[in-house]
Amino acid sequence: MIRLAIAGAAGRMGQRIAALASHDDRFQVSLALDADSHPDLGRDVGELAGVGRLGPAVQPFSSVGNDSEFDVLIDFSLPAGTMAALSVCLSARRPIVIGTTGHDETQLADIHRAAETIPLLKAPNMSVGVNVLFRIAGQVAAALGEDYDCEIIESHHRFKADAPSGTAVELLNRICQSTGRDPGKDAVYGRQGQTGQRPAGQIGVLALRVGDTVGEHDVHFGCLGETVVLRHVAHTRDTFVRGALRAAVWVAEKPVGFYTMQDVLFG
């Protein structure tokens, strides 16, 4: 049985991780962490998630010692929470699964550096379906060729803090890699005013923030005559939780290194 630690345990994703893990014989929730100022510190993580007492109370990152007993940590928090969770895993020499997005360049460098010491799996989206979309988006772009315009549209709930989503950014990067484009030069994030004719090779990336939308991503390829749309819709956050739990089982047996969901699904 895998002893599971959850970073961001009091948040929406953290609660669903606790709930689904509590009904999965592969896991025992052994540690629940969140920000030092979170109002739900001290509450049992299971009661917070609506599944009854599980034992661990939500505790601040700063209270965790090197002797904490867990086998894998799953992080769905905020960028600062990731760094706190990463410190816990480095001290304990335990694997981490990072589902948080929005890290800056310094934080990303620290994350990659940590993978030299512990097994570390990071993905912009933990959904199995989205990771299949990542794999085929670049292939479709390359096969269709330069005659097809490309636009990426993502939609999330009003509470999401970063835009565009990490998933949209990964789709952009994969399409650029497969077609020889540069995301720093060829992507445009929204349009306004007299923009003129659409430049050849441009990729539009548009972000919507609407109500309680869980997550929707569309990649449009169009020429003068037809449109091809790749689409993924997440119906519940449990989609991401199941992928993260699958990743946790996988990375628990891996040596030190940096991994992604592509490694979990495709080897």
Image (spheres, rainbow, N blue to C red):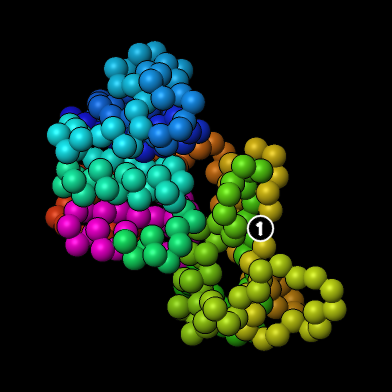
State the SS at label 1: strand
Q: Is residue 168 visible?
A: yes
Residue 68 on the magenta segment: no
Residue at position x 26%, y 63% in the image? 113
Farthest residue to the top: give it: 52
**What residue span does the magenta drawing correspond to?**
111-136
Position of residue 250 relative to residue 53, above or below, is below
Residue identifier under label 1: 207
Q: Quadrant of the N terminus?
A: top left
Residue 6 locus on image (x, y percent): 34, 35
Residue 68: % across, % down:
19, 33
Residue drawn at point x = 67 percent, y = 62 percent? 206
> What's the residue type where badge 1 is placed?
Ala
Marks counted in the figure total 1
Give left or right: position of 83 versus 208: left
Q: Give the residue furthest to the right.
A: 194
**To which quarter of the image does residue 21 belong?**
top left
Q: Residue at x 24, y 58 (%)?
A: 114
Q: Quadrant of the C terminus?
A: bottom left
Q: Please give the name of the residue rendered at 68% of the width and 49% of the height, measured from the top-left corner.
A: 209
Mark 1: give few (<14), some (14-19) or many (20+) Cα within 10 Å: some
Q: Is residue 131 magenta?
A: yes
